[in-house]
Image (cartoon, rainbow, N blue to C red):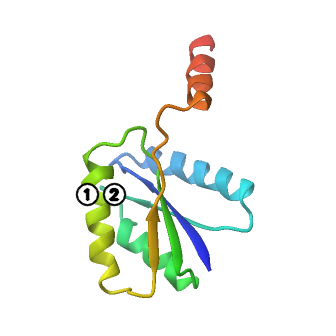
Amino acid sequence: MNGVLILAHGSREKQTMQTMDKIVDMVKAKLPDTVIECAYLQFCEVNLEKGLKKLIEKGVKNIKVVPYFLFSGIHIQEDIPAEINEFLKDYPDVKITMGKTLGADERLADIVADRIKE
C-alpha cells in the first residue's frame, strides 16, 4: 500500500501545527484515496519517525515523504535523508522516497501576489 508523509519543519508555536493540520486536511480532500499523515522535523511530538510509524501501522509499505519546505537546504539535502536511512535499518520491507520541496512554483507566486493585493 502507498502512503504520503507531509513533513514540515516544526515550531514551538501551536498555531503552526493548526495551520499545518488545515493544509493536510486540504490535501486529503484532494487525494481521498491516499493514506496521508503529517510530521515535523523539530519541536513537535510527532517527529519524522513517529509519522513514518503511523503510516506503517496503517499497512503502508511504500512511503513518499513530501517536504513542506520552500527551499532545498541542509535539512532536505542531509538531515532528513540521514534520518530516513537510519529508520529503514529497522524496516527493511518499507520503501521510502523523497518528494521535492515547494520551491519556485508559479502557484506560490500567485499566492504572494494575492497577499500583496489584500
Q: Amino acid at mark 2?
A: Leu
- The reply to whether callout 1 and callout 2 are in contact (CB within 8 Å) is yes
The residue lying furthest to the top in this view is 117
The kind of secondary structure element at disc 1 is helix
Residue 113: x and y in percent read: 59, 17
Instruction: Give the vertical position of 77 relative to 107 (above or below).
Output: below
Which label is found at residue 18? none
| Disc number lying in front (1 or 2) | 1
Instruction: Give the vertical position of 58 relative to 64 (above or below).
Output: below
* Rendered image quadrant of residue 4: bottom right
Residue 81: x and y in percent read: 31, 62
Q: With 77 as the anchor, is 56 left or right in this view?
A: right
* Residue with the mark numbered 1: 79
Separation of marks 1 and 2 at Cα, in angstroms: 9 Å
* Rendered image quadrant of residue 39: bottom left
* Residue with the mark numbered 2: 41
- Residue under the point 62% across and 12% down: 117
